[in-house]
Image: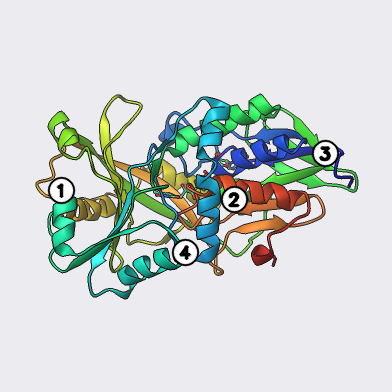
Amino acid sequence: MSANKAIKLAVIGRGLIGSAAARHLCKMGHDVALIGPNEPADFSSHGGVFGSHYDEGRITRSFDPGAFWRQVNRAAISRYGEISAESGVEFYREVGVLHVGSGESSDVASVGKICAEAGILCEAYDDTGLAERFPFLRSTAGMQGYFEPRNAGYISPRRLVRAQTIAAERAGVRTIDEPALGISESGSGVTIRTTTGSVEAERVLVAAGGHTQSLLGQSLGFTVYGRTAALFRLGAAEVQRLAGMPSMRCIGPKGQNPYILPPIAYPDGQTWLKLGGDPVDMPLESEADIKDWFKSGGSIDVADGLQKQILDRIRDFKFEERRVVPCMTTFGDTGLPRIGPLSERVAVAFGCYGKSAKCSDELGRLGGMALLGEVKAELAP
Ligand SMILES: Cc1cc2nc3c(=O)[nH]c(=O)nc-3n(C[C@H](O)[C@H](O)[C@H](O)COP(=O)(O)OP(=O)(O)OC[C@H]3O[C@@H](n4cnc5c(N)ncnc54)[C@H](O)[C@@H]3O)c2cc1C
């Protein structure tokens, strides 16, 4: 391939990673079609595919225990301003992230240690300091916290997909608001069948999240899990009281390690506080399992557990209404996403470990590079 020749490319999946990949590939000078449907209006009656970004809150931060993830987090966060400028869509709030847990936990201590080693700005708080700095916490006795004040907070994954799509379209990407039904590869190209026709491309990147393996008709060693999040609608007084709250990552044993988003304004005009971190690993083994899970509306038992967690953690927490939301995540054995070629003309970019919203712009860029033949060393199979 000549470096200057525009290649006709397709990206399947207009979620966080796919929309980012399309934007990057187009800006590199290629002719790109981005194929994927919008968020379904009603899960229970929807017969098509689902995604993991149908929400307004995802924690973003530089810190991660793994060097790969820290690097992609930082690369993506450094481009949030660029994506907003190219699209006119704001999606990021720098409210900071508090990592908090028992003062005796080595996992908690390692946050401070890793941040210091990696040059991530981070403030340390003992239990007295936590109570003063974060007065909404219910109990801080014996706790230790590390607060990332910069390049951390939350993004709206829904708005980020919109921003990436608009920026990609402005750069020249053609979006096709339909699911891909199948891919066939020949010596001269790839044909992607959609509901109303087909798209021809020289190469295709599949970034279809939890649907990736079923669309390809092969296992790539990743398991899709159903996840439940709980949202709590807040009254005006509670919104005001919790106004300074950062995103929170509670470190503890399974079931006692929720992540908590601060109050966020949702499209219904209300303010909701979300938490997740459910203790149940429920594998979704087929396309039908994924669809049934989203249609089911999520697990009430898990939401009850999350409700207990929020009442335990936020002093005098009051809410008006609870909503239970289903989602899905993908996990592999390596701890790394799968971003690389499957054949001469087909590449994949997926494997989110429940933490790939924040870094999706960099994962999408790496997916685009993989499609062009350049795979990041640590991701090489
Ligand atoms: C409850 C929950 C909380 C999370 N919290 C965080 C967090 O705090 N911070 C964080 O960084 N990450 C978080 N994540 C993870 C993050 O949302 C995912 O990592 C991210 O959405 C993965 O991006 P993706 O592009 O791989 O998948 P998606 O965003 O799901 O996109 C995949 C897209 O592919 C499309 N698609 C599927 N099949 C087809 C097909 N056949 N044809 C065309 N298109 C298709 C779908 O419509 C979808 O738009 C959370 C996830 C969940 C479930």
At label 2, the amino acid type is Leu
- Give neighbour class at mark 1: few <14, some 14-19, many 20+ (Cα, 10 Å): some
Is 210 placed above or below 265 here? below
Give how far apart the Cα atoms at labels 1 and 4 are: 30 Å
Give how far apart the Cα atoms at labels 4 and 3 are: 38 Å
Give how far apart the Cα atoms at labels 2 and 4 are: 20 Å
Q: Which mark is residue 136?
A: 1
Question: Which residue is at 70% across, 57% downward?
Answer: 340
Asked if the residue at label 2 sits under 8 Å from ligand 1, the reply is: yes
Q: Which mark is residue 118?
A: 4
At label 1, the amino acid type is Phe
Q: Quadrant of the C terminus?
A: bottom right
On the image, numbered disc 3 is attached to which residue? 7
Residue 108 position in % (x across, y down): 31, 68
Residue 290 position in % (x across, y down): 49, 49
User: Within the image, what quadrant is residue 154 found in?
Assistant: top left
Q: Secondary structure at mark 2?
A: helix
Which comes sooner in the sequence, label 2 or label 1? Answer: 1
Give how far apart the Cα atoms at labels 2 and 1 are: 35 Å
Q: Nearer the viewer, mark 3 or mark 1?
A: 1
Q: Are circles 2 and 1 on residues that touch, CB within 8 Å? A: no
Q: Secondary structure at mark 4?
A: helix
Which comes sooner in the sequence, label 2 or label 3? Answer: 3
Instruction: Name the residue furthest left.
Output: 316
233 or 305, nearer to the observer: 233
Q: Which mark is residue 363?
A: 2
Is 380 placed above or below 171 here? below
At label 4, the amino acid type is Ala
Residue 189 visible from this viewpoint: yes
